[in-house]
Image (tube, coloured by chain):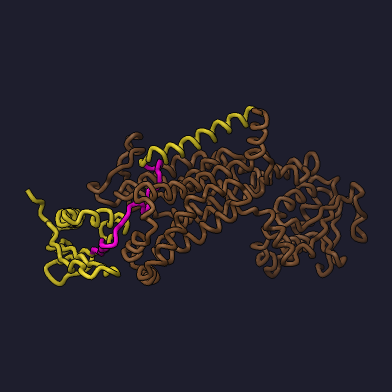
Chain colours: A brown, B yellow
Amino acid sequence: MSSRIIAAWRRYWFAPASLTDLGVSRIALVAIILHLNGTSRYLRVAAVDPALWSPVALLQILRIGQPSLAAIQWMTWASNLLLVAAGLGLAARPALIAAFPLLLVLEAMGNSVGKVTHAVIPLLYAVLFFALAPSDRGFSLEAMWRRSRTAGRAGLVPPEPSRMSDMARWPLDLLFMEIAAFYFFAGVSKLRDAGPAWMDGYTLQYHLLFKGTAPGAWLGGQLQLCAFLSVLVIAFELGAPLGMVRRLRPAVLAGGLFFHLGTACFLGITFWPVVALYALFVPWSRLGRAIARSTGLARRRLDVYYDGGCASCRRLVSLVGDLDLAGAARFVDIAAGDSNGPRGLTACTSIHVADASGMTAAGFDAFRRLAWVLPAGWPTIPLLYVPGLRWLGHQLYTAVSNRRGTPVSTPPGVP
Amino acid sequence: MPRRQWILSAFFVAFVALKLTEGLVRLESWPLTHNPMFSGYIPRNVVPHHITLQGSRGGPWFDLEPSSFNLTRDEFVRLLYFDLANLSSNCGRLGRLFNASRRPGTHHLSALRARVEPIPRPGVTRAPPEQMVPCALEPSG
C-alpha cells in the first residue's frame, strides 16, 4: 500500500518534464519582476516620513530599520543585476539564490508604510522554487555553452533526453499550489468573516461604488448582477485547488484570467503580478511546435547538414538545437553517413541547410535561413540583413573555418 | 526513492503545512497571510465615501494627492478612511509631516482640510451630507 502511495507521489511530483519549458518560464519570471520593480519602485520607502514607517514583523525580527535612499538604490540595482544574470542564464541559480533575500527585504520594506499588499508574495515563492530547481539547464547561455563544449569534445548530446528532467515539474506544481492557496483562503476568509451573506451583492456593490471606476459605477447599480458575480467569485476562489489536477489547471487559470479582468475593469484592481505568473504554466515547447504547425513553419522545416567529425560544427549544431523551440530543424550528420546531403557537399565543409524544395544555403546564408525558422532567432533577422553584413559574415565564417582547416564553398552571389 | 526526492518531498510537505497553518490559524504577518481580501460584510445601508485633502498657503485651496506625502493611494486610504471619528487628527498628522519635510515659508501649508464626499448608493435615500473637516495642523494637548 505504502509503496503504491510513494509511486503515485513520485509520478505526480517527479515525472520527467521539459527543462526548456522551465528555462523559458525562468526568463518570464525574471521579466515580470524586472518590469514590476524597475529602478524606482521602492525609492519612496526611503522618502516617506519616518513617523509613517511601521515595519512588518519580518523587518523587526531582522532588526532592519527604514532604509536610506542610497541603500534602497544599491539593493534595487543589485537585485536587478542578479535577475538579469538569471534571465540570461549566467550562473542563474546562484543569482536567484542571491536575489531572493534582497527581493524579500525590499518587498518587506514596501509593505512597511501602513498598507500590506499580497500580490507579490507568489512571485517571491516562484523565485525561491526556481532557485532550488534546475531552471538553469534549459534556455540559458551557460547551459548552451556547456552543451556546445561537450558536443565539441565528445559528440552531440542527443537533444530530447537532455532536455527532460525529473526535477523540472515540481517548481511549477508547487507554485500552482501557492497560487491556489492564495485564492482558496481568500474565499474561506470571506465565508468565515461574512458568511454566505457575502454573496448577496451588497458587499461587492459597496466596493464597486467606493473604487469609482465608470464600469464599476454602472455595475454597482445592478444588485442582482452583483450577487451573481459574488457567487462566481466565491466559486472560483474555493475551486482554485482543483487545478492541482493538471488536466483541470487550464480551466482554473482561464477562470482566474476572467476574475482578474473583472476586478481590473470594474474595481480598478489588477493584481497583475499574479496573473503574469500564469505565463509560467504555458507549455512553451508544445506551444512552439503548435505555432510552427499553424504558421507553416513546420512545413518549411530545414535539414541542417553538418560534419559530425568537426568539433566546431558539432558545437554550432548544439547551439542551434537549443534554440529550436519549434522543432523546425532536422540535423543530418553527413560524416556518419546519415545522408549524402545536398549535391557537392563533402565532409568537413561549411554548414548547409536545405528546405523541402531542395533549395540550399551555406555558411552565413544558412544562418539567415535558420533565423527565419527558429522563433528564438526572429529578433536577429533585421540585423542579419544590414547591408554589407552578408559579405562581412561570409568573410568571418571563412576565417573561422580556415582556422580549423575547412575548405568553405562560396554561396552563390558572394564574390 | 532517491535521496534528493526525499529531501524535496519533505520540503513540499513543510510548504503545504505552512499554507494550511496560514489559513487555519489566520496568520497575518507579511509575507505570511490568509488573504482576507474584501472579506468583511458591508450591509446595504453603509454609504461609501471619498476623502480629498485640500491645502492652502494663505490663498486658494488646492487638492493634495497621496504622492504629496510619498504615499500610494492604498496607503492614503488606510490612514484616513477607516476612522472618520478621528479624521481631524489623522489628516492633521499628515499635514504636520508635510510641513516638516518642506522649508518654512512659502512651501508650508497654513491650513488643511479633508473633504468627505458620500457616494450615492442605490436604495439609500438618506445619505450623510458632504463634510469639510478641518485638519489639526497644530498637535493637540
Q: Residue furthest left?
A: B141
Q: Residue at 60% across / 29% down in the picture?
A: B6
- Left or right: B13 in relation to B101: right
Chief SS of the magenta region: loop
Q: Residue at 87% across / 65% down in the picture?
A: A358
- Left or right: A259 in relation to B115: right
* Quadrant of res A152: top right
Q: Position of residue A335 (x, y in %)?
A: 89, 48
Depicted A182 relative to depicted A304: above or below: above
- Left or right: A20 in relation to A122: right
Residue A272 seen in the figure: yes
Residue B99 seen in the figure: no
Q: Nearer the viewer, residue A164 or A218?
A: A218
Name the image quarter holding the N terminus of chain B.
top right
Q: Position of residue A95 (x, y in %)?
A: 53, 42
Q: Nearer the viewer, residue A19 or A256?
A: A256
- Left or right: A323 in relation to A363: left
Q: Position of residue B126 (x, y in %)?
A: 20, 69
Q: Nearer the viewer, residue A267 or A309?
A: A267
Q: Residue at 54% across / 35% down in the picture?
A: B12
Magenta stretch encompasses residue A395: no
Q: Position of residue A101 (x, y in %)?
A: 45, 39
Magenta stretch encompasses residue B41: yes
Q: Which residues are magenta?
A: B30-51
